[in-house]
Image (cartoon, rainbow, N blue to C red):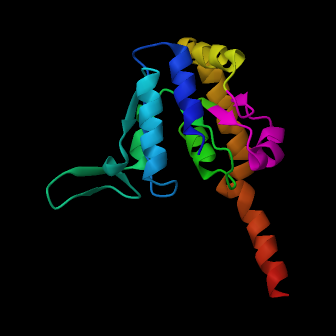
Amino acid sequence: KGIELAIELVHQLGDPHCKLVITHPAGDEGLAYLRSLQLLAQDVNVDLRYAADCFAPTRSVTPEGKKIYSLWDAYPQADFVTYPSLIEGFGNAFLEAVYFRKPLLVNRYPVYAADLAPLGFRCVEIDGAMTAQAVREVRQLLEDAALRSAVVEHNFSLAREHFSYEAVAPQLERALLSAMI
């Protein structure tokens, strides 16, 4: 998942107010990966919050009365989204962050580089390693509300143009009709 890159970003930002929140369960990568992330974060003094037990696909309440939130509840609370995946499918989480108008740091995984970046999305991009330039760009987006607004609105507009229901429905209809023939 490349979460160590996000830890490095928060470390280099050097802001004690920054928190790195992990909302998905560690099951895919294994608990050893989570533990290594926790140790790395501790070593570099990054406040890492593993909150997967607070999130599920839909809101609910446990039998004990604990509220469970949907992932869509997390996005509005975020100031910035990191998408440091090394290998990823299409990138639904990428589009979710764009939908919620959040600035993004993206590791240029193959599908992003081939299918999303050429569309002109404005993201802080890295290629497998955190750079001083990327840290500067993230800091600028966090501190400059006008720039942040311009970037997220640009990205939202691109997503609407290329990935909205109105943009995709005619393509799906053509594909379904050709499959029936």
Task: Check the image and name the residue furthest to the bottom.
Answer: 181
Quick check: 22 above or below 7?
below
Is residue 25 visible to the viewer in this orientation of the structure? no
| Screen quadrant of the C terminus | bottom right
Is residue 108 visible to the viewer in this orientation of the structure? yes
Quick check: 108 above or below 138?
below
Image label count: 0
Depth check: 88 or 37 in front? 37
Residue 122 x %, y %: 72, 29
The residue shown at (42%, 20%) is 45
Residue 58 occupies quadrant: bottom left
6 relative position to 85: left or right: left
The residue shown at (51%, 57%) is 28
Depth check: 73 or 176 in front? 73
The residue shown at (80%, 79%) is 177
The residue shown at (29%, 52%) is 68
Residue 179 x %, y %: 81, 82
Quick check: 106 above or below 137?
below
Residue 8 x %, y %: 56, 25
Residue 84 occupies quadrant: top right
Quick check: 181 above or below 100?
below
Specify the segment rendered in magenta. Answer: 105-129
107 relative position to 5: left or right: right
Residue 85 x %, y %: 64, 43
Depth check: 130 or 157 in front? 130
Magenta segment includes 128: yes
Magenta segment includes 112: yes
Residue 62 occupies quadrant: bottom left
70 relative position to 40: left or right: left
